[in-house]
Image: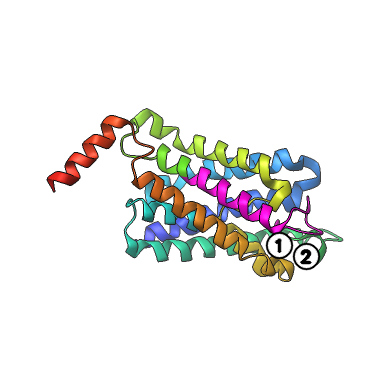
Amino acid sequence: MTKKLMAEVFGTFILVFFGCGSAVLMGEQIGMLGISIAFGLAIVAAAYSIGAISGAHLNPAVSLGFLMSGRMPAGEFAGYVLAQIAGAILGALVVFLIASGKTGYSLAVNGLGQNGFGPGYLGEYTMGAALIFELVATFVFVCVILAATASHVSAASTALAGLAIGLTLAAIHLVGINVTGVSVNPARSIGPAIFVGGKAIADLWVFIVAPLAGGAAAGLAHASGFFRPAGVQAEAKGRASAV
């Protein structure tokens, strides 16, 4: 279990360091497309480095989806969430330490890639728009993860799961960076917000509640058999009846 938790710390660190780091350190040079790709590639890097150890959840909403779908023991959930938050905080801290080395950098002005909404934040979308985007995007994201890593998926397809998940996160960023900066991950939001404070902390509840709701809904959808082929679903029901 300790090895799994350390893997989650490291993997979530990778996500925040690559993703938020690209926004803070290279944002003007690479733009939103580059930032989207960075977040996607971070998932790919983590999936293929620690996926075999912890499953590379990197995200409390993903872990909740696994829990609700019956694919994660309840006893592991809290540990995973704490490890993910710790990794995100470490990632944000390293980005801050690097950014602070640039003349003219201001945490209050330049931030740490924190999420937000409303007046003064990127596209200035409303709280309602932020909630809808984060809920729907997280639902889609976790559905893809659960489906791509399901037991009925072929070994060849499973080997490509990390790439599919990373591309999905990149696509989500292409749609939503202007709306909320894209969270779909409470840990990713908590890390930068702790250092930035102010509005980032005030807005943080949206990036906890909406992603967790989306992840839970995806887990329940997966548990219902919606994402399993008909034959597999029937077989699973048959085993349950036999028990």
**Residue 192, placed above or below residue 129:** below
Viewer-proximal residue, 87 or 135? 135
Label disc, if present, on residue 49 of the rendered structure: none
Amino acid under disc 1: Phe
Which residue corresponds to the image point at 81% horizontal and 58% vertical from the top-left?
Answer: 102
Which residue corresponds to the image point at 54% horizontal and 61% vertical from the top-left?
Answer: 87
Callout in the foreground (1, 2): 2
Viewer-proximal residue, 118 or 3? 118
Amino acid under disc 2: Leu
Label disc, if present, on residue 96 of the rendered structure: 1
Residue 10 in view here: no
Please tell me how crowded label 1 is: few (under 14), some (14-19), or many (20+) other residues with Cα within 10 Å.
many
In the figure, is residue 172 to the left or right of 139? right
The reply to whether the magenta stretch includes residue 40 is no
**Residue 186, placed above or below residue 35:** below
Q: Which residue is mark 2?
A: 107
- The span from disc 1 to disc 2 (Cα, nearest Å) is 8 Å
Q: Secondary structure at mark 1?
A: helix
Image coordinates of residue 46 in percent, x first then y, are 50, 46
Considering every residue shown, the one lying at the far front of the view is 128
Which residue corresponds to the image point at 65% horizontal and 50% vertical from the top-left?
Answer: 182
Q: Secondary structure at mark 2?
A: helix
Tell me if label 1 and label 2 are in contact, CB under 8 Å.
Answer: yes
The region drawn magenta spans 113-142
Image coordinates of residue 140 in percent, x first then y, are 52, 43
